[in-house]
Image (cartoon, rainbow, N blue to C red):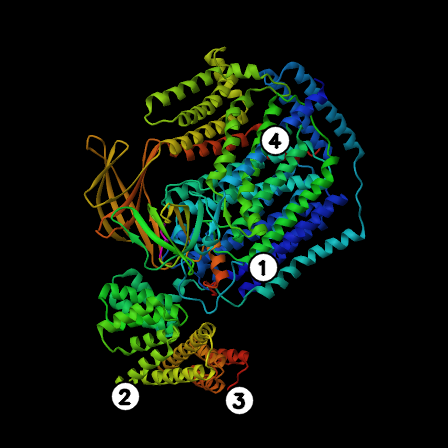
Amino acid sequence: MLFWVIAALLTLGASLAVLLPLAGRSAVRAADGAHDLEVYRDQLAELDRDAGRGLIQPAEAGEARAEIARRILKAGKAAAAGSVGLGGGSTRALGVAAVLAVPLVSWGIYTAIGSPDLPSQPLAARLEKNPADATVDELVARAEAHLAANPQDGRGWDVLAPIYARLGRFDEAVTAYSNAIRLDGASAGRESGLGEALAGVAGGMVTAEAQAAFSRALQLEPGQPKARFFLASALAQEGKVAEALEAWQAMMITLPPDSPWRGAVAQAVQEANSRLAAAGNEAPPGPTQQEIDAVASMSAEDRTAMIEQMVAGLDERLRENPRDLEGWQRLVRSYHVLGRGDEARDALKRGTAALGQDSAEGRQLAEFSTSLGLTAAE
Amino acid sequence: MVEIGHFALVLAFALALVQSVVPLVGARTSNSRMMAVAEPVSMAGFGLVLLAFAVLTVSYAQSDFSVANVWENSHSLKPFIYKITGTWGNHEGSMLLWVLILTFFGALVALFGGNLPATLRATVISVQGWIGAAFLLFILATSNPFARLTPAPIEGRDLNPILQDIGLAIHPPLLYLGYVGFSVCFSFAVAALIDGRIDASWARWVRPWTLAAWSFLTGGIAMGSYWAYYELGWGGFWFWDPVENASFMPWLAGTALLHSAIVMEKRSALKIWTLLLAILTFSLSLLGTFLVRSGVLTSVHAFATDPSRGVFILCILTVFIGGSLALFALRAPSLTAGGLFQPISREGALVLNNLFLTTATATVLVGTLYPLVVEALTGDKISVGAPFFNLTFGPLMIPLLVLVPFGPLLAWKRGDVLAAAQRLMTAFAGTLLAVLATMLFIDGATVLAALGIGLATWLVLGALTDLALKAGFGSASPGTMLRRLTGLPLSMFGTALAHLGLGLTTLGLVGVLSFESEHILTMKPGETTEISGYVLRFDEIAPVQGPNFTESRAKFSLLDAAGKPYGEIVSSKRFYPVRQMPTTEAGIKTMGLSQLYVSLGDETADGSLVVRIWWKPLVTLIWGGTLAMMAGGAVSLFDRRLRVGAPARRRREAIEPAAAS
Amino acid sequence: MTRKQKRLSVIAGGLGFLAVAVGLTFYALGQKASYFYMPADLANVTLEPGQRIRLGGLVEKGTIVRDQGTEVEFSVTDTERSVKVAYSGILPDLFREEQGVITEGSFGPDGVFVADSVLAKHDENYMPKEVADSLKAKGVWQEETQ
């Protein structure tokens, strides 16, 4: 509200700056020539001073004086001639247009590009809020502030790192894991977390750097499932699908039955099988182009797998910590984008239930979903 | 309230549109009410942009990350001073600063323009309105600093660490005061062309603006150069980098304008040429803005760039430069020529100065744009660097510098070179002495170095000779001399001071280029090395935690030849975790006019450190000289001649309205 | 001399001056402009011995070799070919493996590029333009989209 009052006052002031002179008395002004005469007189005086200092020879000073005198004569004539103004309707129309343009242009543009409802959000005020009301991001910020003050706190980095990775902030996850490793030493979990974060930074590609991290993890803990899984993915991304399949199949055998990795590995095995089958059917004559295509599509699918894994993580997190409007919005959008409409609607229902149907946040979530073309009822 | 700032900016744009049209129509139709719109509108426009800028600054100070610009360029842990200076340490904020200064100058014209003919004043303010409207539209359309983020991120991405420096906090405002100051000269030139006549007061009005803009630009360039010197850790102060050239070209053209405006002001000659220079100088400022913002040229200083902005600025550039030059071609022939003069005269000397300076500007322009042209034509990628400029710019500057002391000694209209040369005999003798002394007493001095020292001495002594002669040194009693000296117009002191500064800068350049010594070596703690008669001992290296960085800080002790401690040098390598960027903080010890510069490299396998040490003789004079030039400009600005009909008189006019006519 | 002759001689002097300046500029452009190449381009050009060029590309992973002193060797690659570069001095702050660099210098008789200056980016968002263009043309590097 205050904003609209101030904006209106500013507009009023600006319009008055245009209106008052236009509505005011027509000022009597000196002819332009009068200003020139003033300057010429001063030039003459200065000429005398320069001549006194010997900066100009007497003969030339005389010439210069004559030049200035001629200009004075000319200026006098011009001033006498004067000029006559146009008046009347066209200028008045322009004046009205100018006065109207100020509010119209400013409010027109501002409505299009401004965000009048968005208040200022100074950081200090945001951090003073009750932690219970804080979003995950704000909690992370507190942890960051703590770590900024105590950057040698390895445990703090260790806690923060997987949270970053879950939030998709892979760059920061890399930094956090690196710091944890630097301060508290390497462990299989940290190294494989670092590898995963590095892969996240690269958009799902298991880069050489990431592979190195996974290899270190395996040295520290042979058989660590995350490292093995990603190293196999790396093989697949390099086009060595058969080798990747072998590695995944080996994993299936050694993984304990209750391992959370079983699902992901099974899916990977299935995909690798179908890929190999497809490649076999087409019987490629020359390997190069197809191979390249295969790598391209493979990495895209891997990326999808990665995204799905992330979405699942988000879903999991929201079950634990459901009061998170932003999280629900992200989840609904993710399912929607992945084309899984039913799950999106389910997420919307769960979110609405968690946030409260009639709360401001609940309504916001509903609005957000409507903007995606989703309603809970369908 | 962030959105108030946003709204104020939009409103300022609406006012700029009115300012571009109404006063101009008023001036063309002699409608004094329409002309009267100019002043309140330009002042209100300034007030609104100031409000917008203040709001943005507050958002930075409070780390309001709901503002995208703050989120991209700030961080809650950044030292407070850099939160504030970060406001203009990025593209959007710096463009807002640009417009703030533009509207500020527009408001100044409105405020102090009482002694200008009303039509000229209205037209000038209108032309300023065009520039303001164009750049406000640019900001709103492509670089809005008030774009919002929702939900707001909790932490920002920090300012590029090499910009977190006090030098870079001062450099852009100074540079923009210079760039944009020339916009006033441009507006005056365009207004004169629209009017089809140049008032006598025109030059008197343009000269102070030129002086002020030139002084600021000098300071801005010097500051940028000093920043590059100590912050980039390579000890270089000028790289002939496109971005540097972009600021140097308006400076060269502005220097030419400064000199030709003297002729126009005093003798009403060179009117058309001065108009053209005023247009060109601001055009080069715009070109500089384009080159820096668009990223069309490879530059070590490039901001992260965005092609759509480049296209937009290119449009502004085309319209303003093309339009003003077309107007010039159309109207210039109808302008009357001014006073006559002989080739050998003060006027002639200033024309020669202009010839050298504009040619030098052209070579810099060619060198800067040539790679673009070649790439467009042949696809070859080439780079034009220092060797090109040394070969072209150098030969143009040296004769100009040799001729500088003659200029102020020549009489107006018709001068006598021989008489001037005679008066410079003492200065010449001093110069010879300096050359000989350099050759005899300084080890390893080449002939070229000695001549360079001679050139610098010549400039310094020439400037002093000028003052001494005007005071009547040698022919008058000390009392008379003092009286004469105090009676001299300030602009004469300004001239002498600026030329003196030029000599000092030259001396600094020659000192560093000819006598610099450089050592690159690996050192372990406790080891010593000798440089220029001093012994440098590497004491220790230790990690230190800064507010938003960590650094490895190396301490060195400086001992004189006898082994007594002389001073301490601290040099460090910093790491800014937010941007994952290392920076070098060079250790600099100033001794007299010279500096010892220590910068750190990487650690080698055996734990010793690569250290690069320079001995930079007389290096401080490079920037000291520019300070003297700035001071010269400022002193000239207070000359009473430039206040003929200035504000003091305006008040009198208000009391006695009839007095003027 | 009449006034007209005087004016003509002044104009002729000015034009002569400009002609010298233009000549000098073109001579300097011919002599002093250095060409920019990526390693793969070098196969198609013949360079004079000692000719200065700018060589750009990415610092190849695992090729940075520092000796005990200030000598550094690394390879610059455009992923097709790579060129060994020798440099003595302090590398720029942001010199890293797999980052864009521009080196300036000339080839020694042994085929090693002896650089006297190494430019890396100054801003982590910034890639030297020539390197970026050439890498984009080769499809190696994509602009980050944020």
Q: Marks 2 and 4: CB-CB under 8 Å?
A: no
Q: Name the residue under label 4.
A: B260
Q: Mark 2 points at which residue?
A: A257
Looking at the picture, how far across and down is residue A125, in whole percent? 40, 64
Amino acid type shown at disc 2: Pro
Amino acid type shown at disc 4: Ser
Mark carried by residue A378: 3
Q: How far apart are marks 3 and 1 (CA)?
A: 40 Å
Name the front one of labels 2 and 1: 2
**As displayed, is residue A319 above or below residue B418?**
below
Q: Distance between the residues labelled 2 and 1?
A: 59 Å
Q: How far apart are marks 2 and 4 (CA)?
A: 89 Å
**As displayed, is residue A119 above or below residue B341?**
below
Q: Is residue B181 left or right of residue C125?
A: right
Residues drawn in magenta: C92-96
Q: Which chain carries label 3?
A: A
Q: Mark 1 points at which residue?
A: B141
Residue at 46% over, 31% down: B628
The disc, 3 or 2, on the residue closer to the chain's N-terminal end is 2
Q: How crowded is mark 1: few (under 14 residues within 10 Å), some or many (20 or more)?
A: few
Q: How crowded is mark 4: few (under 14 residues within 10 Å), some or many (20 or more)?
A: many
Residue B243 appears in the figure: yes
Q: Distance between the residues labelled 3 and 2?
A: 38 Å
Nearer to me, B308 or B31: B308
Amino acid type shown at disc 1: Ala
Q: Marks 1 and 4: CB-CB under 8 Å?
A: no
**Magenta residues, dominant SS class:** loop
